[in-house]
Amino acid sequence: MTDETTVEEQSETQKKVAPAIAKPVLLGRKIGMLQHFKEDGSVVAATVIAVESNLVTAVMTAERNGYKAVQIGFGVMKKESKMSKGERGHLGDLPPLKHLREVRVDDVTGFNSTLSLSSLSSFCTASTILEQISIANPIGF
């Protein structure tokens, strides 16, 4: 290998790292609930969430869209034919994703399409309390 290829490989790996966000955001799927018993006998409820790979699908800039945001997608679909043509065109070369959400950020520099966000372990430790925002799908009468 020459020195030029080594420099190009290093710059490509640096581009894949997501920039720091004030409030880290990861999208996931709820698996269930569990209870944790403390030493004093009190019970603490906990939600179990499966965090899949989160991909940046689009970057909204103030010049182009009027606000700064990053669109994140997760949940790869098994059949691409279940998506509309507009959704397939929007994603382009990315895999077909079930869920797309926009997250407002202060600075969009460093984000680009096809960027994979870091895992949950880089955002928090075992004692970190995470804020959970959910979307309910009520089924009933």
Image: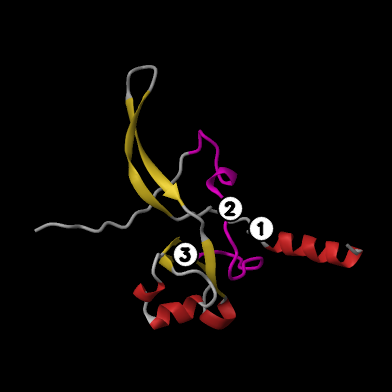
User: Which residue is painted at 66% across and 61% down in the image?
Assistant: 16
The residue that disc 3 covers is 73
Q: Main secondary structure of the magenta part?
A: loop
**Residue 35 location (% of width, % of height):** 33, 31
Which region shows up in magenta?
102-128
Name which quarter of the figure residue 139 lies in: bottom left
User: Residue 51 has which mark?
Assistant: none
The quarter in which the C terminus is drawn is bottom left
Name which quarter of the figure residue 11 lies in: bottom right
Q: Which callout, 3 or 2, points at the residue further toward the start of the chain? A: 3
Looking at the image, residue 96 sits to the left or right of residue 9; the answer is left
Q: Residue furthest right?
A: 2
The residue that disc 2 covers is 118
Structure colour scheme:
secondary structure
User: Which residue is painted at 32% across and 23% down in the image?
Assistant: 42
User: Residue 17 has which mark?
Assistant: 1
